[in-house]
Image: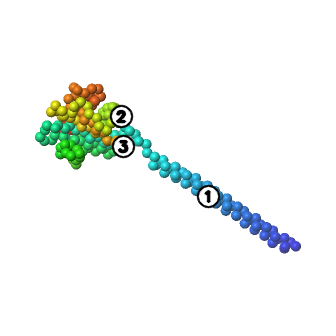
Amino acid sequence: MEQVKEPNKLAFMDIVIVILLVITLFACQEQNSKITLITRVEQKDSITSKTEKIIDKNIVEQIIFGEYCGECVDSCAIMYCYNIMGNQNSLFVDYTDSYFGKNRKLKFKTPIIDKDKLAIASQIVKKIPKCLQNSEKLTETYGCPDCPDGCGIYFEIKKETGSYKYYIDTDVSVLKGEIKQFAEYLIENIQNLNM
């Protein structure tokens, strides 16, 4: 009888082992599915946060500026384009008078690598008055630029929210407040860039 009990004991132990293996297997599968689910949710959240984009209306990406004179023979509209790209800012100039062309398609093909001139352009960005930075108008005119056979200042701010164009009189006596101060600053610094 002892021999009969041994195989029953073994058979019972085998059944217990099989049951434990099955339970363990299902438990592992259930836990793996929970892990997979959590992983998918975390990936989805990280994808969502990567695609969300917060637009800061005041971040200037580029400025275009210069002085233009309608009653002029040569070099009547020298324009500058300053691109702001982190530590890789760049400055280009358009000597072609393309400002007066059809659709005012400017041609910035000449790079300026002079560090002093790059510093001037960088300072201009820092001096942009709040009234221009916060303006929602796509085009504004201050004074009567280039009217009494004088010249005008063209100033454009490009941001993620759009392109904002300003036409400013060079006769600063007709201007007021921040715009007057900014026009004086621009006139002086455009002359420095033209040297």
Q: Name the residue under label 1.
A: 32
Q: From the viewer's perspective, is 1 left or right of 132?
A: right
Quadrant showing the C terminus: top left
Q: How crowded is mark 2: few (under 14 residues within 10 Å), some or many (20 or more)?
A: few
Colour approach in the figure: rainbow
Q: In the shown orientation, is residue 11 left or right of residue 127? A: right
Circles 1 and 2: CB atoms closer than 8 Å: no
Give the Cα separation between the discs numbered 1 and 3.
44 Å
Q: Is residue 107 above or below residue 134?
A: below
Residue at the image position 54 percent from the left and 51 percent from the top: 42
Residue 37 sits in quarter = bottom right
Q: Is mark 1 on a helix, strand or loop?
A: helix
Seen at 21% across and 46% down, the residue is 102
Identify which amino acid the numbered label 2 is placed on. Answer: Asn
Above or below: residue 102 compared with residue 190: below
Q: Indicate which label's residue lies in the foreground, 1 or 2.
A: 2
* Residue marked by disc 3: 160
Tell me the residue that label 2 is attached to.
134
Q: Which mark is residue 24?
A: none
Q: How far apart are marks 1 and 2 (CA)?
A: 53 Å
The type of residue carrying mark 1 is: Asn
- Locate residue 120, reporting x and y percent: 26, 37
Q: In the rendered image, which quarter is residue 86 located in?
A: top left
The image shows residue 168 at horizontal and vertical percentages of: 24, 33
User: Sequence order check: which comes first, mark 1 or mark 3?
Assistant: 1
